[in-house]
Amino acid sequence: MLVNIVGQIEPLQVSSYSDLVSFYPRLKGIRYNHVISVSSNGTNSSELTSELDRLALKAIRSQSELIVTTGQTARVEQLNASRFADLLIITNDVDLKIPALAKDSTHKVLLSVDHVDVANRNAIAVGKTTEPITDWFERSFMRDYASIVLESGLATAILFAKATLIDELCLTVTGSKSRQEADEAVRDFSQKLGLRGTREQLLSSESTWLYRIRILK
């Protein structure tokens, strides 16, 4: 697959996620990764993403120590445990039915519940919280994990954005035939989050556009 790099003449030949790792260097802080489709109303990422986006997701996860999501997202996506990083699922559901809990994993699967009774022996209950989610997360996890990727819906991302915890946006726009259309989708989404930033890079292949944006604080 040939991938165009905005600002460079020669396209990049991409055959695996490792070809994209240099475009997502390890970040001290929190990346928010999200997919925006301008042509689909799909409910999960498999209906929205392209091969390029799936490779980029692996590259991002490979540079992370902790993946953070919610029970709702984990359920809709039917998430597996990661082979790159620990997975934290923010949820009150002690009966969450997802592949990540159905078998042993090499990395931890952490859940914000008081107890777990699942097949994965590396699943750990870290306890419920009555604090605001972002206060609890900052106190409980940000000292132990330096490089974090947030993979959640808009509501949770807004909470992290309001707490000024997001340092970088990694946004994929799919179904867009022009850069102008993709740029507009990114601007609209950034406004919903209440974030401003500067673009660090832009990759594209056919109708998929990958943005990496450094957040201004």
Image: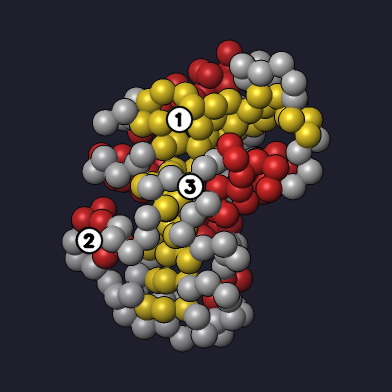
Residue at x-position 37% and y-position 60%: 145
The amino acid type of the residue labelled 1 equals Ile
- Mark 2 burial class by Cα count in 10 Å: few <14, some 14-19, many 20+: few
Using the numbered discs, state the Cα–Cα distance from disc 1 to disc 2 in whole angstroms: 26 Å
Q: Which residue is mark 1?
A: 213
Image disc number at residue 84:
none
> In the rendered view of the protein, which quadrant contains the C terminus?
top left
Residue 182 at x, y = what percent? 58, 21
Dot 3 corresponds to which residue? 26
Q: Secondary structure at mark 2?
A: helix
Determine if residue 186 is in view. Answer: yes
Image point (54%, 27%), residue name: 201
Q: From the viewer's perspective, is 206 left or right of 140?
A: right
Going from N to C along the chain, the mark reached first, 1 or 2, is 2
- Residue 206: percent from left, percent from top: 75, 26
| Local SS, label 1 | strand
Q: Is residue 146 above or below residue 198?
A: below
Please give the residue where the numbered disc 2 appears in the rendered image.
139
Q: Amino acid at mark 3?
A: Arg
In three-dimensional space, the C-alpha distance between marks 1 and 3, rounded to whole angstroms, equals 14 Å
Which amino acid is tagged 2? Arg
Q: In the rendered view, tell whether residue 70 sits above or below residue 6.
A: below
State which tag comes first along the sequence, 1 or 3. 3
Residue that appears at 61% across and 44% down? 21
Quick one: label 1, few (<14), some, or many (20+) residues within 10 Å?
A: many
What x and y, as percent, mark residue 41? 60, 37
